[in-house]
Every structure is written in structure tokens, then in C-alpha cells.
Image (cartoon, grey):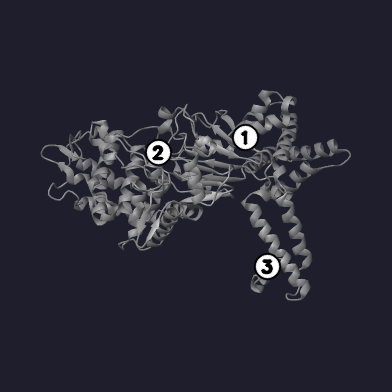
Amino acid sequence: MDTTTLKLLAKEYPTITEAAAEIVNLNAILALPKGTEYFFSDLHGEYEAFSQLLKTASGNIRDRIGQIFDSSVTEEERDFLAELICDPKRILKQVTKREDYREWFHVYVYRLIEVIKAISEKYTRSKVRKKAPAEYVYIIDELLHVEYENKTLYYNSIIDSIYQTGMAEEFITGVCLMIRQLAVDSLHIIGDIYDKGPHADRLVDELMTMDELDIQWGNHDILWMGAACCNPVCVAQAICNSIRYNSFDFLEEGYGINLRALSIFAEKTYGDDPCTQFLPKTYDKNKYDPVDSNLAAKMFKSMMIILLKEEGQLYRKHPEYQLNDRIVLERIDYAAGTIKLDGKVYELKDKNFPTVDPADPLRLTAEEKELMDIIISSFRHSERLQKHIKFLYTKGSMYRVVNGNLLFHGCIPLNEDGSLRMFVNGPLIYGGKEYLDLINEAIKNAVVSSKHPENDNMFRDFMWYLWCGPQSPLFGKSKMSTFEQYFIADKASHVEVRNPYYDWVDDPETCDMILERFGLSGENCHIINGHVPVKAGENPIKAGGKLFIIDGGISKAYHSSTGIGGYTLIFSSRNLLLAEHKPFVNSETFLTPKVTVVKHMEKRIIVNDIDRGEELRNDILLLERLIEAYRSGRIKEKY
């Protein structure tokens, strides 16, 4: 063992006694049940819906209340206790007006403490204390562990003191937060935090409060990461997506992206054009920055044309993308009002292109260049956006392997026969894990390049390919047919052919092959991904339980097609569960999810059985060697 490493460890444990005490502590943790992991996918800016799922632990808190109190408390009271834990401020406004508020306070403090006892059984006392509100740590610890002979008198004395000092509401609120934090030990977000919903910014703020969190990037996340890196195509697409879903508050109030210049340009350019095709989808109203839908349509079309120009220039610049057929502005016959795609001529629904020069269709006008400079500058100088994107880079990756599960957003590119699609990069060939590792490195390089946006950088350009490229594992389709959907009536042109991966997700052998490429094997290993919304009635459990697609459509934009409100996969020490949620109504309506036990563990999983266990065993080994070094005299103890 390297003496330098042991000397560094000795600074934290300067005596044999302290090192030995930590070994005892770590061995105790190894024997505890594993914490509950939650897997969410495709949140799409739906802050309120996600916040409620998180507060309810996807219905798990209500289930635990049922187990704790069983028949001793009515079902109505159990529901009420669950609502109190999830939304204490709203409930307390109601109960503080009751004449028996003092008695109510006594009863519900007792019930909340019982919930903490049950939920915290997996944790050390020190971890439970860390989750408690700082000002009430001692009080909560006493209530949890009091063993005095006259327990009831002591208990009531503490609760009375809290009430008499006027701290009842603050205490209840703090205890409820503590329960919510204990209920979710770790959180895995499997992509697409951004777009469609009204407040991805608030959603990221919420995620930034989580201690144990990892993110697997989705194509919508990559789009915004590319935009924050000042990739002009990503910027244009991000603006289009936000206008399309009427997310003006998100842009202007959330990130300070000023669209005044765009609104002036749009009104001037398309004043007489109704731009009917481009009317935004209105699922949420803007509170701070309402924009007339007709003006929004003109703004949308303005950015769409700029996007098509910037996209075409990028494909010219990168022939290796093999996307020249997607330079659509060069395929339009402007005199006839038609376009030729895939050998077929289509009539355009919209034939008004006042800013396009048929002789040089990809050239931006002087006004468009000026407009893009203004918007890109807003992205570059938005402190909140840059802070959020930095968080995504820090916590995110293309995939993660954790506790026997392989997490990624979209797909692992496959050939038609189900074999791995291989990609050549110089002298090397990549597929599966190696391909995702290569992409992961390219994304990190794009961050470095963002510090010098004036430079021509292939990595920053590549962020766009990851958004919509046919071999992007985050996109997983043959093309992004946005142009066809807005300009061509024939729906046959709108078809986006999915990667063969999605034809093989029900095949156990294919899933085993993918898992093995990532170092996983055995019946307790699974693939968990999202990206493709699963409709009501369709089974999100594939390949006999080997693979889970958990994009159930938390976004309002999907509710009409999926009929549900998203999935949560829950991995506790006893069970693997799938929660199917109903579409979110409002923050005051708590809807009970349909929870299915996918797999019941033959024996309870403890920390020693999971990845964290291996880390702790390595720590113990180091501490044991430090003690040997102390005893041999190689390192001196410090008293």
C-alpha cells in the first residue's frame, strides 16, 4: 500500500482508536438495508407534476403510512396524514383554525414521528440527524429514541413545549420535509428535463437541492447544453421549441432571454402573413410574459426559417454527418411552391418565404444575422442558464451503471438483425459502451469550446447531431420531420423510422447482449430508459422484466396520446416496483398511482450487496492498513 495514501488518510483518522471506530461504523452501515432508489424519465419542464411525485415519493409515503398504522387509523386519516406530509403549509392553514388545534397537534406529531421511525430504519442515526431541521435535531432525536419509564409524560412535555412557544407550524413543516427527504434515498433522472413543459428552470432548481442524484442526458437536454455553448442551430431550435409550447415565461422570466428583437423582426417580416401553421400549443398560460398567439406564430416561423438556414449550413460544413438530404431549403422550387424529398414532389402548405433568396437559400439576411447575434448573446450571458447547464454537466453522463441497472435515455444503436451497430472513428471501431463513452468525451470537449465561441469547433457542432442525427443514441430515429409536419400535408412524409433497437427491446437475448457490453449479467440486471412515450395499455416492462421504458408521458403534450401521467420505477430493499401515475391536475389534488410489484426479492438487499458496499469495503481495507502502519511504526499516531 502506498504510504502517501495512508498519510493522507491519517489526517482524518490520526489515531488507532479513531480508525477502528470508523471501521465499526462502516461495518454497521454495510449491514443496513439499501436505500430506496427512484427512476424518473422525460420530465419535460413539468415542475409542478414532478414536484408532487417527489413529495409523495410516487405514492410510496402513502403506502408506508398504510403499513405503519394499518387498522389503528381510518383510511381517511391516513390520506390526510399523507397530504400533510406532502403539503404541510396548505394543510396547516386549514387545521390552525380548529378549536381542537392543540389536541390535533399532539396526535399528528406522534403520527409523524412514527412515520420517521419506519422510514429511517435503513439509516444510521447520524444520517437521520442530518436530515432533521437543524433547530429541532435534539428534539426529534429524543422523540424518536426516548426509552424512559414514564415515556408518555416525557413525550407530551416535549410536544407541549413546542406548542406553547408558538413553533408548532414550523416544527410540523420541518418534520414533513425530513420525511420526504428520508423517503427518497437516491434519484436517477433518465433524460429530457427540458422542453414542452412550462418550467424546466424551476425543475433544475429542485434537482439541485437533492443530495444523491445522477442524470443521464436526453436529446432535449443536449439541445439546451448545445445552446448554452452558443451553437447557433441549437439556439434557434431551443427558441422554436419554447415558442411552440408557449413557454415565454420560461425563456424571459426564467432565463432572461429577451425576445423583443425577435417580436419586432417577426411583425415586420410577416405582418400580413397569418402564419396559421405556426400557432403555439397552449397547455399552460404565461404569467409574466403573455404573448398574443398570432404574434407568437410569426415569431415561431421567423425562427424556423433561421433554423433551417443554420441547419443547412452545418450539414454543408460536416459532410460526415451524411445529412445533405436534410438541407431542405435547397430542395424547394420557390416558383412552383413545391419541394422534392426522397424522390417525391410535395406541394407546400406555406409558400411565403420573404427572407429566403432562391439563388442562395441558406444565407441569412443582415437582419437575421443581427437578430441571432442578440439571441446568442442572451444565452451566453444568462447566469441562471449557465449555472443550470453546468449542473447538468457535473451530474450528468450518457449512461450510468448502478446496482445492477444500466440507465440511458434513448437507445443503443443496433442493426436490423439485432447486432450492435459499429462506428468507425479513425483507426478504431466503436459500438455499445465504447460508442457512448466516445460521445461522452465529445460532450465534455464541447463545454471547453464554449469558452471560445468564436472558434470553429467540431465538438460544439456535434451537439446538434446528437439532438437529431439518425445514429445518435439520444434520438434514435431516421430523421427529425419538423419541416414536413409544418410545411407538407401528406402525413406519409412525417414518418420517423425508429432505430432497430426498439424492435428488439422485447428480446431477452438482445437485452443480455447489451448488458454484457456494459459489464452486467444475471437475472437481477436491467436496462432502464425512456425517450419513447408508452401509451396506456402498453406494457412498459419488456423482455420478461429485463428492460423498462419509463417515459409514460408526464408532459401535458403527451396526455392525449398516452392517457397516463408518467411512470416511476422504484427499487427498494425488498421490491422492484413500477408506479403508473394519472395525469397531474393541480398541486392540491393528490392522485394515487397504480403500483405494481415487478420483482420481490427473496432476501432483503443490504448495503453490502450493492455498489456502495464495495466502496465501503475498500474504505475498511484502507483503514485496516492504516492501523497496521500505526502499529508497525511506519506512521506515527497524533494524540
Q: In screen coordinates, is 41 left or right of 2?
A: left
| Residue 588 placement: quadrant | top right
State the separation of the CA atoms marked 1 and 2.
27 Å
Residue type (three-letter) at the residue carrying disc 1: Asn
Residue 201 appearing in the image: yes
**Residue at the far left in the pictured view:** 335
Give residue 196's mark.
2
Q: In the image shown, does 294 or 186 lie closer to the viewer? A: 186
What kind of element bears circle 1? helix
Q: In the image shown, does 293 or 19 lie closer to the viewer? A: 19
Residue type (three-letter) at the residue carrying disc 3: Leu
Task: Determine contact: label 1, label 3, CB under 8 Å.
Answer: no
State the separation of the CA atoms marked 2 and 3.
48 Å
Chain-order first, disc 2 or disc 3: 3
| Residue 60 placement: quadrant | top right
| Number of numbered markers | 3
Q: Residues within 10 Å of mark 3 (few under 14, many from 20)?
A: some
Task: Determine contact: label 2, label 3, CB under 8 Å.
Answer: no
Point out the image quarter for the C terminus: bottom right
| Residue highlighted by disc 3 | 9
